[in-house]
Amino acid sequence: MLIKDTVAIVTGGASGLGEATVEGLVARGGRVAIFDLNEQAGEALSQKLGARVLFCKVDVTSESSATEAVKMTVDTFGALHICVNCAGIPAGAKTVGKDAPHSLDLFKKVIDINLNGTFNVLRLGAFEMAKNKPLNENGEKGVIVNTASGAAFDGQQGQAAYAASKAGICGMTLPIARDLSKLGIRIVTIAPGLFLTPIFKDFTQASIDSLVGCVEFPKRPGKPSEYADLVAHIVENPYLNGEVIRLDAASRLPAR
Ligand SMILES: NC(=O)c1ccc[n+]([C@@H]2O[C@H](COP(=O)([O-])OP(=O)(O)OC[C@H]3O[C@@H](n4cnc5c(N)ncnc54)[C@H](O)[C@@H]3O)[C@@H](O)[C@H]2O)c1
């Protein structure tokens, strides 16, 4: 699908990988609705990029918040063709800690934002995409891109909740592709390695250095623009569907 003149939602679009995706889609001629909790950063990005970007304050875990924002997107831009899910949070806690077992509330919160939030927005987005007329000879009506993590495969110590949420995103990719095939909608999941975005603001330099040490080649963190370029390629390449793509310069996380 050509990005020019399409309409996209980018959750988590106020920061990091989502922000780069918003910029990448707009640079290719798309219009974008940013769905994010961070009003200040989201509004600032929308102002910077102009009338082709709309900010919607959205909690991806909320059915009513996401429903309202999808409606506002379609009312503003006329349709919806692309849904990129980047909203997510990290979490670090061992299954059994020093004084207590892993907090069940923390586990549920991470699953709720990272996994349930992704599904919440994509199901609403797909329902809108299904209303589109086919955009090309392949019959494409829409594309969904989700964001997992290398932790879905090589979760480290302390990553039970985060890894479970991301493995869920990988696991639902193929069944959703199958569900949506008759509707002309594709879905692909990107599993990023290390990208130095604000998600790492509470990490120590030592733990960041150790993560960079796991990268094979090129031996550096990924650039958010490299994530955005892959999103654009997924949208543009009609034969990518139902797949999880690792974007990690061959890095594999060790146990700790
Ligand atoms: N940066 C990395 O190295 C890396 C690696 C693997 C996976 N990921 C995944 O990529 C995605 C983007 O990460 P990032 O590095 O850009 O992080 P980030 O912290 O820079 O951005 C995440 C954004 O999600 C938003 N958000 C959080 N909870 C939300 C909610 N309930 N509703 C709406 N918005 C919400 C935040 O406000 C923020 O703007 C996340 O899902 C993350 O798990 C990142």
Image (cartoon, helix red, strand yellow):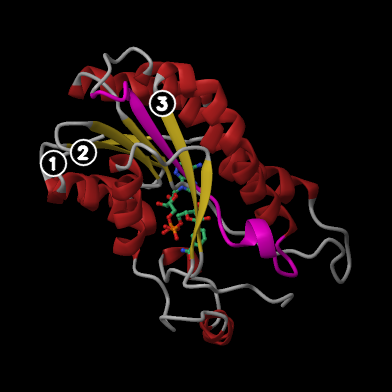
Find the magenta span and give its range.
Answer: 136-159
| Residue 152 vertical placement versus 30 (above, below) | below
Q: Say which residue label 2 marks.
A: 3
Q: Could you tell me how far apart the alpha carbons at marks 2 and 3 are, in whole angstroms? A: 15 Å
Residue type pointed to by label 1: Gly
The C terminus lies in quadrant: bottom right
Q: Pointer 3: residues within 10 angstroms few (<14), some, or many (20+)?
A: many
**Marks 3 and 2: in contact by CB < 8 Å?**
no
| Picture disc at residue 125 | none
Q: Nearer the viewer, residue 235 or 195?
A: 235
Residue 15 seen: no
Q: Could you tell me how far apart the alpha carbons at marks 1 and 3 are, in whole angstroms? A: 20 Å
Q: Give me the residue at 43% from left, 23% from top.
A: 126
**Residue 63 screen position, x and y as percent:** 52, 23
Q: Give me the residue at 32% from left, 25% from top.
A: 140
| Residue 59 vertical placement versus 147 (above, below) | above
Q: Nearer the viewer, residue 220 or 118?
A: 220
| Picture disc at residue 29 | 1
Disc 1 is placed on an element classified as loop
Q: How many discs mark residues in the rendered view?
A: 3
Of tags 1 and 3, the one toward the viewer is: 3
Left or right: 31 as drawn, with respect to 132 = left
**Residue 68 screen position, x and y as percent:** 38, 20
Quarter assignment of residue 94: bottom right
Q: Is tag 2's residue or tag 3's residue first in the polypeptide sequence?
A: 2
The N terminus lies in quadrant: top left
Q: Nearer the viewer, residue 141 or 49?
A: 141
Look at the image and say whether residue 103 sits in the magenta stretch. no
| Picture disc at residue 185 | 3
Ligand 1 contact, mark 1 (Cβ < 8 Å): no
Residue type pointed to by label 2: Ile
**Marks 2 and 1: in contact by CB < 8 Å?**
yes
